[in-house]
Amino acid sequence: MESLPDLRTPSRASRRASDPAPQAGAGHEPVRARRLLFDALGALPFRGLTPARRALRGLPGGAIGSGIGKNGTQVSAHAPAPSADVLQLGKYYPPEPGGIEQVTRSLVEATHGRLRHYCLLAARSGRTRVEEVPGATLHFLRERGTLMLAPLLPSLPFVLHGLRKRGFPVLLLHAPNPLATVALACSFALRPKREKLVVWYHADALFDRAWKRAVHALYRPFERFVFRRADVFVAATPHHVAASPALAAVASRVRVIPYAIQDSWFAAESSDAARVEECRRQMDGRYLLFVGRLAAYKGLDTLLAAAPRLAAPVAIVGSGPLEAELRREIANHGLAARVRLIGHVEDLRSWYAGCEALVLPSSSALEAFGLVQVEAMAMGKPVVSTNLPTGVTWVNRDGETGLIFPVGDAAALAAACNRLLGDEILRARLGAQARARATREFSCAALGDRFVAFVREAGWERPA
């Protein structure tokens, strides 16, 4: 692969000497105006931007710190990025939790050896730094807080604008990501788009409070500006396209590429038999499993309402804002023997391996995919989920990989679970078909093949 251009910003004198003489109608003044505007922005006296300025100028300290990073990778104070095919503009990176975070890593791992990535990310803790992992450079910018679940990164506009000068063939924006979208819109205003822009649209932004809707209304013009310049949109399922007004408006430019989980989920030896048995002992025998964030859109109220009718107790694995409320509800309704709050666990595979089925009672379109369904399917477990018009019902197919019930219907949820609990043959058949579908559609190999083919078919790869 060819080397990337130097990121150092030339002096104004050298730019004037190297710039061609202005031609009539050549658009020289707008270019000069953009340069002057960016120079003015770069002179703003924000302490938080100092690492970004240094990174852009190629000076020492651009990526502060050295040693081993959180991902077990080498951290460098000055690590220049090798040639890369894809500049990913994401949010965080595992081990930080989150769907976009998992997709960012899955894409790096799935295309390792075929495409190289440069990922621009937020760091919840630690300083601005660069880490190298197989197949990617991870450039972390220090977070200064959050706004509506999005990281606040004062240096992002400057670093992103500088990185675009390196000539990445593909820029991949994970959306919704309001502040990153605003930064990209500003960069496009200063420097015309030459790379191919791919927007991986994960879900519509839904807000339950007026002030959040007002902030989103201010952000929407930036999003429209960026989306008009997108060459391709990516969605995880066909249901994403049908259910999302934003994707429906650009349906002719949408490519479907399902999410993936790590290959270790498919390894038969990934669960220790003794630990699986310990999970069953903790639940007094067989059990149903819920895995996820304890939030309102997960439909846990429906699960609690169904609990007295279930033929097996439910293990709820996860944490979140509803945890205290759930504990009160369980105590008030005498459900301690039927519902157990397990909290966060490290050995999630053992809980999947020990359960009879996964239950996903989500009640809102905020549940756009339900990656936990794929994890359970990879472990050979059937899924009981709601009939949301999102990717949830594309992942779990009624009668093939599990059972589906109407949103909010506790009686139907109990009936579906009890049907599986009472029919071992049905449970085994759906579990085997679920594993086959997960292997075929949601493995890293499948994701890598689809994304690489997508990039190569379009001729977007960096030339060798």
Image (cartoon, rainbow, N blue to C red):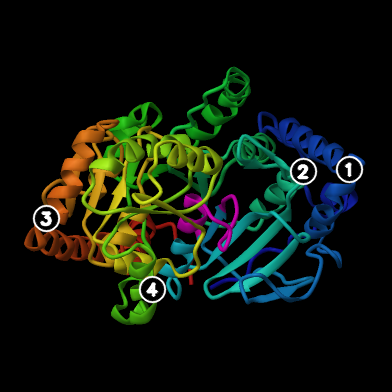
* Residue at numbered disc 4: 278
The CA distance from mark 1 to mark 4 is 53 Å
Task: Please name which of the two marks, 1 or 3, marks the residue nearer to the observer.
Answer: 3
Part of the protein shown in magenta: 89-104
Q: Mark 2: which amino acid?
A: Pro
Q: Mark 4: which amino acid?
A: Glu
Earlier in the chain: of badge 1 and badge 4, it is: 1
Q: Mark 3: which amino acid?
A: Gly
* Residue at numbered disc 1: 46
Earlier in the chain: of badge 2 and badge 1, it is: 1
Earlier in the chain: of badge 1 and badge 3, it is: 1
User: Disc 2 on helix, strand or loop?
Assistant: loop
Residue drawn at x 74%, y 60% is 7
Residue drawn at x 27%, y 33% is 389
The answer to whether mark 1 and mark 4 are in CB contact below 8 A is no
Foreground of the two, 11 or 163: 163
- Residue 18 location in percent, x, y? 80, 52
The CA distance from mark 3 to mark 4 is 23 Å
Foreground of the two, 34 or 24: 34
Task: Please name which of the two marks, 2 or 4, marks the residue nearer to the observer.
Answer: 4
Foreground of the two, 277 or 103: 277
Q: Is residue 417 visible?
A: yes
The CA distance from mark 2 to mark 3 is 56 Å
* Residue at numbered disc 3: 422
* Residue at numbered disc 2: 154
The answer to whether mark 3 and mark 4 are in CB contact below 8 A is no
Left or right: residue 24 compared with residue 104:
right
Quadrant in the rendering for residue 221: top right
The CA distance from mark 2 to mark 4 is 47 Å
User: Disc 4 on helix, strand or loop?
Assistant: helix
